[in-house]
Image (cartoon, grey):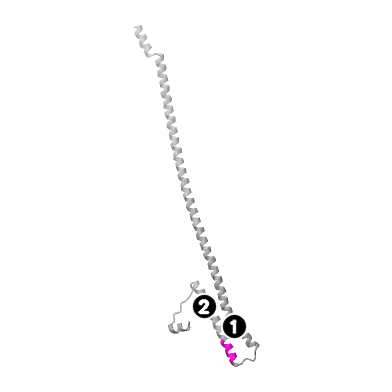
Amino acid sequence: EFELFYGTYSELYDVKKINKAKALEQQLIQQAKESELVNLELKNQKTINILLFTIIGLIIIVAGIISYYLLRVKQFNKELKTSKEKAEESDKLKSKFLQTILHKNRTPLNGIIGFSEMLMADRNISQEELTQVNKMVSKNSNDLISTIDNLVDIANLTTNQYNVKKTKFELFNLLDNI
């Protein structure tokens, strides 16, 4: 019986087997801890990946917005340059127009002044010469008034303030006067 008891006791309490079982238990505990650490690391890596994708997405969105506004600024600058060029061209045309108009006003005015001075300087003018000078002063005065009227009409047209006057006229008479 002793041997049976000792054999059963030895089998039950075999130090090598117990140590082996404890070593296996420690290995299982260690593997469980390592598995838990791996799971935590995977969870952390997933969180980091999500954050990185979010940051990259935000960077792409911000870059897109910046690109859009840079494109709009470039387009606005192009339109601004075109508008500036048009304004400069318009200014040149206005200057040329004013130069022409001043010349057209100066010519009849010089004629009026010249004939007036001639009348005042020469008291011995014949009636025929006086009539001719009066006709020239009258013509130059009418030309000056016509030029000024045309200027007013042009100014009204450019500011959209021109009032259309409806009148009947003879087309052939108008064409003959042109």
Residue 134 in sight: yes
Q: How many marks?
A: 2
Q: Magenta stretch?
A: 128-135
Q: Position of residue 36 (x, y in %)?
A: 42, 29
Asked if one can make out residue 170 in the rendered structure from this viewpoint, the answer is no
Q: Secondary structure at mark 2?
A: helix
Name the disc covering residue 111, or none.
1
Instruction: Identify which residue is drawn at 58% across, 80% down.
Output: 107
Residue 150: which disc? 2
Q: Within 10 angstroms of label 1, few (less than 14), some, or many (20 or more) residues?
A: some
For this view, does 133 lie left or right of residue 25?
right
- Image location (x, y in percent) of residue 53: 45, 42
Amino acid residing under circle 1: Gly
Are discs 1 and 2 less than 8 Å apart at CB? no
| Residue at screen point 59% across, 90% down | 129
Is 138 situated above or below 55?
below
Inspect the magenta stretch and tell me whether residue 129 lies in it. yes
Does residue 136 lie above or below 101 as drawn? below
Is residue 45 highlighted in magenta? Answer: no
Residue 159, above or below 112? above
